[in-house]
Image (tube, helix red, strand yellow):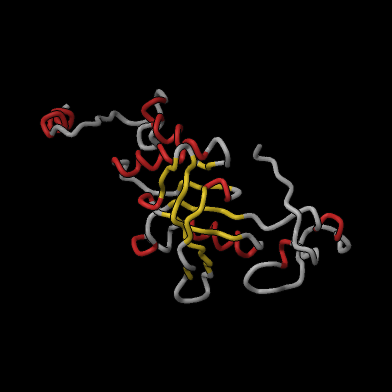
Amino acid sequence: PWVRSFPVDAAGACPASLGRRARRCTCPLPADHTRLRRRFRPMEFLFVMDPLEVLILETETSLLLMEEAGRRGHRCAVAHLQDLYLVDRTARAWTRPIAVDDESRPLARLGAEEDRSLDSFDLVMMRKDPPVDLEYLNALLVLEPASERVPVINHPVGLRQSNEKLLPLELPGAAAASVLTADPRVVAEFVRE
């Protein structure tokens, strides 16, 4: 169900020539690739992530992914954990289109808020950083039924069952001696040993 054809606009514009700035096609395909171009259309990506105000811009890879997607003619939108919700088993979110350009300030321009079904996107990317708290876990519960209809990168079941911070503990020899606790006495004992 996730395999789709992506025909371009009626003019047959190449995906590489779409986007904010019109430019000559720079595809690595032969110069006359009109027939191939008609098979593709821009995709729409949803990034579920932290608010822009709290991101560390120098290290935030989600923004780089959005910028590159935009450069290739695709459209991106953002949503935050509290924007996700379910109607029956249909995952929805309040989303905002986003355009990222590293050479401009502000770095990102957000469009008007829209209420959309997650399966109206071609791909959903769960990019929210920890903490893994109740709000995060609730968002995973919303994303899980969405993953039945649209690809979700960083699958919600995987995130819930294999916490990235604890995963090294599952691989013998991959982590130093460790303790996970909220009890300061256990931490003190662990440090003494």
Relative placement, left or right, of 171 versus 40 is left
Relative placement, left or right, of 30 versus 117 is right
Q: Nearer the viewer, residue 104 or 87?
A: 87
Q: Nearer the viewer, residue 141 or 55?
A: 141
Outermost residue, front side: 88
Relative placement, left or right, of 123 versus 23 is left
Residue plotted at (45% across, 63% down): 113
**Which quarter of the figure is the N terminus placed in?**
top right
Outermost residue, top side: 172
Residue plotted at (49% across, 68% down): 111
Outermost residue, left side: 185
Q: Nearer the viewer, residue 126 or 38?
A: 38
**Which quarter of the figure is the C terminus placed in?**
top left
Rendering coords of residue 2 (x, y %): 65, 40
- The part of the image, by quadrant, that contains residue 190 is top left
- The part of the image, by quadrant, that contains residue 9 is bottom right
Rendering coords of residue 84 (x, y %): 41, 48
The answer to whether residue 79 is above or below residue 25 is above
Residue plotted at (52% across, 47% down): 118
Residue 50 visible in the displayed image: yes
Residue plotted at (44% across, 42% down): 87
